[in-house]
Amino acid sequence: MADTGFTVRGMRGSDLAGVCDVARAALVADPVTPELFARKVFLDLNFDPRGSVVAESGGRVAAFLTGFVRRHPIEDMADDSDRSWITLFAVHPDFQRRGIGSALFDAAEGWFRQEGKLATLAGPYTPNWWIPGVDVNAYPGAVEFLKSRGYEEVMRPLAMDSDLVNYRRPRWVSEKQATLEAAGVQFRQISPELVPDLFAFLKAEFPGDWQRHLRETVTRILRNEYPARHVHVAIENGAVRGFAHFEGERFGPFGTARSERGRGMGAVLLCLTVEAMRESGLHDAFFLWTADSTAKLYAEAGFRESRRFCLMKKALG
């Protein structure tokens, strides 16, 4: 008879091949490579094997869970030191329905409580999140499993994709751009002299991890590794009032000042960036997280819903 016992322990580097095997079999919508996993988990400043655990059975990795508590704050981000995060978990189909998933969660949640955390979220950990919650279509069983453990739904963000080959700019966006430019708004690609104003804008309007994203991309632009069209900014009265950015096929982050929303500035920046992606030879664009309230704007530029997630949270008490 096959051994059905298992041991839960901290994750080691030597577990990586087994972890990727589990992910390949169980996380069918989310490719996990050794390089990507090492970057998002092992290289994270907050990685700790007390939170990232595996279940081993017969010398084989049967399941894994990556959990984090924050020891290194993100620049200018609001204090979230009372939280913990589960970014990825999976049980190999050969080992499901044996209590292994529950054992992994018991271990991770127990450590979170020891660390004094008041809540844990499944999904959106900064800086190294994978997806913004559980994909409700790809992993419906995971949603039910989390509910059975006391996790509650917080929101249902969606991912969107766009076929750039068939992209056509809406006429109203061109008209809006002309109106804004006539009023003194400039739409420009990033250049060295705009860097201080861009980051002052980000610090004021979008404190947190977006600054890291933009810093990495702008650094590559200034090293001539990327063309300047990877970052567009909107400027009015000498100040940056909005920006848009892309990295490979991934669109965003992008945003406008709270005081400027509703003027169409964001729609122009969105289309300028999508057009820059086409000019770079890309055939598709995607992003992983928006809300239904803003999906209409993206739809105007050809984006369509591709995935739906359930962001879930549990009070630890």
Image (tube, rainbow, N blue to C red):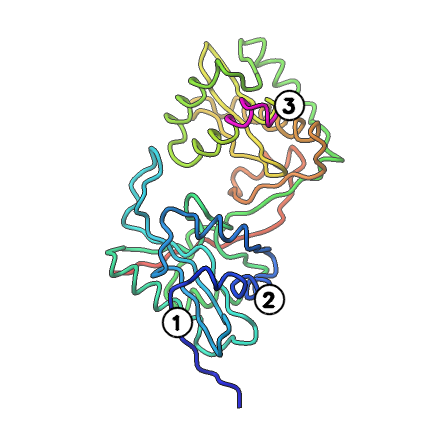
Image location of residue 78, percent across then percent down: 31, 38
Residue appearing at x 66%, y 20% in the figure: 174
**Quadrant of the image occupied by residue 169:** top right
Image location of residue 12, percent across then percent down: 43, 62
User: CA separation, marks 1 and 3?
Assistant: 55 Å
Report the front residue among 48 and 309: 48
Q: Secondary structure at mark 1?
A: strand
Q: Which residue is mark 2?
A: 25
Compare marks 1 and 2 and give the one earlier in the sequence.
Answer: 1
Report the front residue among 282 and 148: 282
User: Which amino acid type is marked by label 2?
Assistant: Ala
Contact check, label 1 and label 2, Cβ < 8 Å: no
In which quadrant will I find the C terminus?
bottom left
User: CA separation, marks 2 and 3?
Assistant: 44 Å
As displayed, is residue 160 above or below residue 30? above
Tell how many labels: 3
Numbered label attached to residue 173: 3
Image location of residue 165, percent across then percent down: 75, 35
User: Which amino acid type is marked by label 3?
Assistant: Val
Extreme residue toward the front, this view: 14
Residue appearing at x 69%, y 39% in the figure: 284
Image location of residue 101, percent across then percent down: 44, 70
- Near mark 2 (Cα within 10 A), the count class, few <14, some 14-19 or many ≥20, is some
User: CA separation, marks 1 and 2?
Assistant: 20 Å
Extreme residue toward the bottom, this view: 1
User: Which amino acid type is marked by label 1?
Assistant: Val
**First to last magenta residue range:** 218-226
Q: Secondary structure at mark 2?
A: helix
As displayed, is residue 242 above or below residue 238? below
